[in-house]
Amino acid sequence: MTRWVFAFEEGSGSDRARLGGKGAGLAEMSRIGLPVPPGFTITTEACIAYQAAGTFPEGLMDEVYAHLARLESKTGKRLGDPENPLLVSVRSGAPISMPGMMDTVLNLGLNAETAEGLARVTADRRFALDSYRRFIQMFGNVVMHLDLGRFEAVLEAVKAAHGVHEDQALTPAALEQVIARYLALVEEATGKPFPTDPRVQLEMAIRAVFDSWNNPRAQVYRRVNRIPDTLGTAVNVQTMVFGNMGETSGTGVLFTRNPNTGEPGLYGEFLTNAQGEDVVAGIRTPRPIAELAEVLPDTYRQLVEVAGLLERHYRDMQDIEFTVERTKLYVLQTRTGKRTARAAVKIAVDLVREGILTKEEAIRRQDPEQVRQLLYRQLDPTAPVREIARGLPASPGAASGQVVFDADEAERLGNAGTAVILVRPETTPDDIHGIIAARGVLTSRGGMTSHAAIVARGMGKPAVTGTDAIRIDLEAGRFTAGDVTVAAGETITIDGATGRVILGEVPTVDPTLFEEFETLLDWADDIRKLGVEANADTPEDAERARAFGAEGIGLCRTEHMFMGQDRLPVMQEMILAETLPDRERALERLLPMQEQDFYGILKAMDGLPVTIRLLDPPLHEFLPDLEEVEHDLDAARARADEAAVARLEALARRVRALYEFNPMLGFRGVRLGLVYPEVYAMQARAIFQAQSRLLAEGFDPHVEIMIPLVGQVTELERMAEVIRAVHAEVEEHTGRKLPYKLGTMIEVPRAALTAGRIAAAAEFFSFGTNDLTQTTFGFSRDDAEAKFLPVYLAEKILPENPFIVLDREGVGRLIRIAVEEGRKTRPELRVGICGEHGGDPASIAFCHEVGLDYVSCSPYRVPIARLAAAQAALGG
């Protein structure tokens, strides 16, 4: 028979899948003797069964009440007892942390009678009434789905009537008014009175937590973070301890190291005379944790000891929630702390240096996609700025965008491509879709452990919170900071590293690698088997790639070199030429330009391989659109400009002649080189002449020439003859040996399936996985992503976008075949990947698995690829 419920002391930290992260943490802390309020956990399996059937699984509530009886015996209190009432919290806890996405209920068990009993037991009527009003508000919102704003409006009205500004200033009489109005509000809104039976409250709260697994914000969070929908959430029922029992009580959240920078030392916040939701929800701006040493010094010392113990026990930075009840410390939760990419790297390296982790463990702990955040551009420190406010630096990074005050509007504009900054008094979990779409988040309330801070940090988005200097008017759609008013749609910049709020857009600069990051990447280089190269088309890109650790250029696309203002007219002249001599004259003008391009890239990568792909796209891409040409032709005819008419008619004829129904499968790549061999011959000559110049200057250029879109070996053999002939001419002319390798891109299925034959003519293969994916699926990428691919992903027809994460079953099988067949023919065949997948960690793991020699990606993804390649070598 399935068991649905476990007491904290019955579980362990290794049982996250069944107990959830929070339940496993509570079990482990109970096991090692920390001061954890007692309780029990309802398993994720119960949630899964509930989701499937729509009702509690058989026997669940019997187990809950059996554990409740043990909890009552342990505490000496009873749920619903007006003389000595037991109050509990009911909290979610998924196996993978989803902070703020699901629901929590505190102070459960209160009604009019138990509130009076609590007042007598504690000799603090104000505290008891404050706890009761909090419970009605939270239960009404979370369980009964009433708008939180309606409760807040009542609270604000009573505070105004009594002439107070802070919740803590409300007297017992005022709190009685709040409670009465809250109860009336619930009955008016739902048509039935607020539930007063604590057991009914408990069942409703458990159901609400289970239901919250599938609320919209949780679904969005799982989709963004690739968390399976099948995990379910556990429910933790825990004895309440109270931080709102006066100034010797309090609540807080802390990290054992700074989650923004990774620096050692406690980082967090607390509030006296408050409950946990006050800190996390950003309702009040809390105080830095260091100040607790002045307020409650003994408690602070104990907290430092507990934090150190938990970090050593879990061998990682911890995120700890705690409550102090009349100077006694209780630990409510510990979990591995969310952190920025910079902090993740520094913490891992520091833990290795402290002897807590091995280098291999430090590598395994990194999320390559999170590390990408380290390579984002940052604010230019030399740019003039107009700072209008300063808040708390809650999540580093910088972003500029239009001010938006509503999460729905942020999503609409963000999805349309507009850069937006979401500005709110504080964010709630219901704002998750707006945070995802925004470039950054700015709040006027809340601390560095508030919802906005934690979620933004986890997503790698900048956030500035607790910006007291700004006054937000949501109805008017504007905020003021001093004498500056900023309306919706105006542009601001936020700097999450300093907390600055800046008027207008601020320019950014390229990132640089910091010491711990370089150390981590050096460790990765010692572990990985895959080489890491870069896709680069200019000397500047090549230098940047080399600075990031690229070991060569795996793809240099020559077509981009023809798009410059000085080159495009000459390229068009070559395309429009109707005779070979005319075409060759245009190519002679392009030759020195191409030679200088290759000279710069080969020089920047001195001593490392540079794979140069000869011209690949269809020629029509270098010509203007036919509609544009015809418009200009009509204008020339109207003004009787005969010379322009003749030129434009010739251009229109050529554009029509080059038109293709499906250019991706048309006249491009090697097909272009075979029909116009003089084009590839010019490019080869430019390469070899640049190579010769560099050798004469004492450099060591490593040249690899790649023929694109080969589908059969005869295509490659013919082009090899053209290139060999040019090579011989340049060697003879310069009197210098010019070593090079010739290879091909494998980007059509036939090439993969006949790789054994193609390898006889190729010294290397490079998989062009963008086109290989298109031709394997029969998808046009632009059309697929614009029309049906989003539906395929939403409906889970495909698990991932195959243009971002390599399709192992189809495209991957072709790659396996090509590698195996190619190396049978040529054992020393060098094989790599140069498509977009070369920078995707999951795809890199596959490349390691099938025995590729290298991956090639954009310069800014080189560090990610180095790290992912090491993780692949370690097996995770």
Image: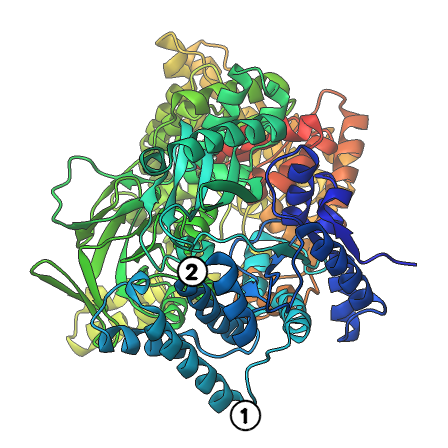
- Nearest the camera: 507 or 811? 507
Q: Is residue 778 above or below residue 832?
A: below
- Tell me the quarter of the image containing the N terminus: bottom right
Local crowd at mark 2 within 10 Å, few (<14), some, or many (≥20)? some
The residue at which mark 1 appears reads as 191
- At x 57%, y 55%, the residue is 240
- Nearest the camera: 526 or 314? 314
Q: Is mark 1 on a helix, strand or loop?
A: loop
- Nearest the camera: 12 or 788? 12
- Nearest the camera: 396 or 290? 290
- At x 23%, y 51%, the residue is 493
- Closer to the observer: label 1 or label 2? 2
Residue 551 in sight here: no
Instruction: Indicate the quadrant where residue 13 lies.
Output: top right
Q: Position of residue 328 (x, y in %)?
A: 49, 41
Q: Position of residue 450 (x, y in %)?
A: 40, 52
**Relative horizontal placement of residue 26, taking residue 482 as reference (left or right):** right
- At x 37%, y 25%, the residue is 543
Q: Position of residue 434 (x, y in %)?
A: 41, 64
Gap between marks 1 and 2, in whole Å? 33 Å
- Tell me the quarter of the image containing the C terminus: top right
Q: How many labels does the image show?
A: 2
Local crowd at mark 1 within 10 Å, few (<14), some, or many (≥20)? few
Q: Where is residue 110 in the image (x, y as percent from the top left)?
A: 55, 69
Amino acid under disc 1: Gly
Amino acid under disc 2: Asp
Disc nearer the start of the sequence (1/2): 2
How does the figure colour the protein chain or chains? rainbow
Q: Is residue 698 above or below residue 184?
A: above
Residue 820 in sight here: yes
The residue at which mark 2 appears reads as 124
